Amino acid sequence: MSSVLAVYDLLVYDVARMFMQKTSCKRGKATYFTFLVRQSFRVPEGPRSRTVCNVTNLPPHIRELIAQGLRGRELVDLESLELSEAQSFGGLAVLRKAWDDLGLDNILAAMATPRHAGLIKAMVFGRILFPSAKLALADHARGTLLAAACGLSQARETFDEDDLYAAMDEFNGRWVAMEKQLYAHGFSSGVSLVLYDLTSVYFEGKGPAGISRYGYSRDHRADRPQVLLAVATDSKGLPLHLEVLRGNRGDTTTLQGLLHTLRRRFGIREAVFVFDGGMSSKVNLEAIEALGLMYVTRCGAGVLEELLAELPSDQSPELWDRTGLMEIAKEGKRYVIAGGPWRQERDRQRRAARMTKAESELKRLAAVERKKVSAQKLASQVGRMLQRLKAHKYFNYAVDQKGRLQWSPRQDVIHAEAQRDGLYLLRTNAPAQQISDAGVVAHYKNLQEVEDAFCHLKDYLRVRPVFHYRPDRVRNHVRICFLAYWLSAKLGAQWRLKGQSVEVHNLLRQLQTIRLGRLEVKGQSLKIKVTRVPKDLNAILSKLGLLELFTQPPAWAPG
């Protein structure tokens, strides 16, 4: 014990010049270690050192404490060490880096105040990490470094709902310029392929006057007023433009407005536009051709049946290989018939399922005992049921005067449809020299990217349900979601180039388990530490070049 006291006395005055020396001595087959506390000093002849004490007989953990003290480390009582706070920041760190790398602060530079820009940034990050209503953002931000990551005061920011709405209102009159900047940043060399599609978003309650209307609901909520979202993306799903339209607009009435917006706002003069059959009216196709643009769209089953009926017998669909393509020119129009074994089997199973369900319902209706039989009423009931199950064309049915229901499958219709299983018809005005048959099909299949965009916008980022009651705030709410998806899409594209196809939002939410902890001793802040990266994420982060974000506390974190 006296050795320890001697060391402590010297540490007080001369710790900077003391160190622990470990020496070894071999006697026979045994090796012996000696631990000495030594002091270095200088004399006219040069540097010297001397032994202060021998601590070999002390327990190893005591020797380690002495060694750490001699190195200048601060030693504290383990019982007095506390973790005062641990705030999630992993996903935020990645989003903050991506935001800075993409220079998105420049897009928000026109905001009235830096705090409004920070609140917009917080809502965008929140949409990706914990999508929720504006009122709930403060709750979700609790226990995270959301405020600090967005350049706001971590200690004072409350994310008050009124402040968030005021920040959203800053989009009014500024969004067009912002969208132009996003386009210039994301598509510096322009775009050659534009994918366009529509979806609907419903409201809880009446919705905002002017744009909230009852219409065809893709969400299967015909009982709710809605708006339409029109989204244009490039071939990789990166969004170019988003528009909020009245909920009762017909699909065919939306396309020409988009064409003029893209030409006027982004200067798109030469591109191939790809859209689904619901927008391929004669007027729209003529308008596209008048602008000197090319298009690829899908035609309805009726047009496909007409073309197939005109084919010679040796080209019957029964003889086709579903993996091949067939080009048909008719009245100066170019058509491409495509398909595939997977689509063929899908169509067969879908028809079989509809017929099975319909036949089950027919048997149920036929077995019902009725006190008073009305043949007309029962036939009407059967017709509505078959229409609902999309099986009306597959059955002949009749009700006799005694109220007995009889039916039979229409084998000719079923056989004719089976011949077309897996086939679909595309139309384009692009010459074969410019876009091959396979290219036409590939362009149309890219519409899946728009459907993925809608999936992100509506499900992952939770555009719906919408509770806003001002048209401008509905638009601004959707614009927040647009920015969130734009940022996610850019990150996803960068990660795919590095060989990682992980879902952006999934990885970011997993990274939120990484926290920044503050260690305190008796109320005094001692050190800020980053928790360990989960083992299952190490390899992914290493490939993405993101591990360095978690080697030390970020510079933007509060001290």
Image: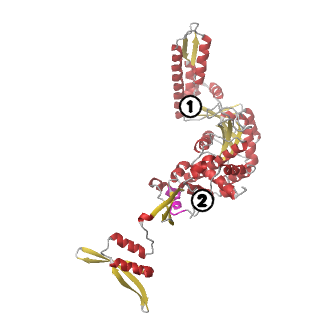
Q: Which residue is tagged 2?
A: 155
How packed mark 1 is, by other alpha carbons closer than 10 Å (few <14, some 14-19, many 20 or more), is many
Badge 1 vs badge 2, beta-carbon distance below 8 Å: no
Placement of 97 over or under 449, stated as above or below: below
Is residue 496 positioned above or below 518 on the image?
Answer: above
In this rendering, the count of numbered labels is 2
Residue 446, image x, y percentages: 61, 42
Residue 271 x %, y %: 70, 45
- In this rendered view, identify the residue nearer to me: 11 or 408: 11
398 is within the stretch colored magenta:
no
Residue 548 falls within the magenta-colored stretch: yes
- Image quarter of residue 208: top right
Image side of residue 275 versus residue 35, left or right: right
- Residue 153 visible to an observer of this rendering: yes
User: Which three-letter amino acid code belongs to the residue tagged 2?
Assistant: Ala
How does the figure colour the protein chain or chains? Answer: secondary structure
Looking at the rendered image, the quarter that the N terminus falls into is bottom left
Name the mark nearer the viewer: 1 or 2: 2
Q: Which of marks 1 and 2 is nearer the N terminus?
A: 2
Picture quarter with the C terminus: bottom right
**Mark 2: few, some, or many residues within 10 Å (few <14, many ≥20)?**
few
Query: At numbered mark 1, what does the secondary structure look like: helix, strand or loop?
Result: loop
**Residue closer to the observer: 40 or 432:** 40
* Number of the label disc, if any, that sits on residue 431: none
Task: Please report the bounds of the magenta region as a residue range.
Answer: 541-553
- In this orientation, which residue lies closer to the viewer: 303 or 430? 303
Under mark 1, the amino acid is Gly
Q: Main secondary structure of the magenta part?
A: helix
Q: Is 112 above or below relative to 415?
A: below
Q: Is mark 2 on a helix, strand or loop?
A: loop
Q: Where is residue 46 in the image (x, y as percent from the top left)?
A: 43, 89
Give the residue pinned by disc 1.
422
